[in-house]
Image (cartoon, rainbow, N blue to C red):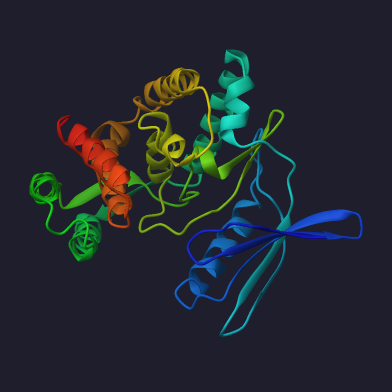
Amino acid sequence: MEIEVKGHSGCQINIVREANELFVYKSSRDPKYLVRLLMQAEKQQQAAKFEYQHIRVPHIFDVSHTSEMVNVKMEYVYSKNFIEYFELAGFEQISYLVKALLLFLEKELKESPIGELNSEIVADKFDDVCDKVLANALLRDDEDIKSLLERTKTIFNTINTIIYIPLGICHGDLTFSNILFNGNNYYLIDFLDSFVESPLLDIVKIRQDSAYLWSQLMYIHEFDKIRLHVISRKIDNEIDRYFSRYDWYREYYKIFQLMNFWRILQYAHEEKIISYLKNVIKSILNEF
C-alpha cells in the first residue's frame, strides 16, 4: 500500500505499508531542495538522541541520496493535527501541552549556553530578505512594503554589535502544524535549518502561531475559530509569561519575530496572505 501526501518546498511524501508496519517516505528530486532535505534529516536524527518529557521525535530509519535524489524513511505516527486536537481538548490537556513545550524548550536551553552573536549575521540575513522581498513581483511596487522595510531597517540599525542569546540547538520550525498529537505525546516533525541555531528561534516560531495564528490561516477546512483563538491565546500568554524571566528574551524576541515574518513575506504570492503579513509586521513595529 502506498498513499501519496501533498508535500511542500519540492518535497513528496508517501505513506507506505511494509509487512504490517507503516512508514513515511519523504523524498525530493528538486535540485534546490536536495541539500536542505539532507540537513533536515540529519537535524531530526540528532534531535532524536535527546530525551524529552512528553515530546517525541519520529525515528528515521534510512537516508539514501544520490546527486539527483534524496529519500528519507521514517516512523509513521498515528496522530491528530493541531486543529483536530484543539477542537476537542479541554484546558487541562492544553495546560499539559504547554508544560511539554516549556520542558522541551528548557531542554534546548540547557544545551545552548548564552553566547555572543555578531549582529552582522542578523543584518546580512535581513539584507538577503530585503533582496528577496523586492524581487517578488507582488511586493516590490507596494508602497506599504517599502515603508515597512524602511521602518524595519531603522530597528535593525539600533542593534548592538554583539547580541547575547542562547546558542546551540533548535527545531527551526516549531509551529503547531509541525506537531503531531497522539494522546498526551507530541511528535515533532519537519526540522529546519536556521540561520541562527538558538532556542529563541523556536520560541519565535511557536509564538508565530500562538500569538499571530499563522498556521490557522493555512488550514483550509472549517473549524471553530473562536475556540482556536481562545486556546492559542492561553498558550501564548503562558509561553510569554514563562520566558519573560530571561533578559535575552525580553530584549530580542520582538526583533527576531520581526525578522521571522519578513522571511515568510518574501515568499508570499496570495493577496490575502500579503495583507495579513503586512498587518502583522506593522503591529510588531508599533511595539518598538
- Left or right of residue 274: residue 36: right
As rendered, which of 153 and 144 lies closer to the eye?
144
- For the point 45% across and 24% down, the residue is 232
Horizontal and vertical percent position of residue 151? 9, 44
- Residue shown at the point (48%, 56%) measured from the top left: 192
In the rendered image, residue 283, in percent from the top left (x then y), is placed at 20, 32
Q: Residue furthest right?
A: 19
Q: Position of residue 176 (x, y in %)?
A: 51, 37
Q: Residue at x 26, y 50 (%)?
A: 262
Left or right relative to 36: residue 139: left
The number of callouts visible is 0
236 left or right, relative to 139: right
- The one of 79 and 238 positioned closer to us in this rendering: 79
Outermost bottom residue: 67
193, 81: nearer the viewer: 81
Q: Is residue 86 above or below residue 191?
A: above
Relative to residue 171, is residue 82 depicted above or below?
above
Q: Dividing the image into 4 quarters, which one contains the N terminus?
A: bottom right
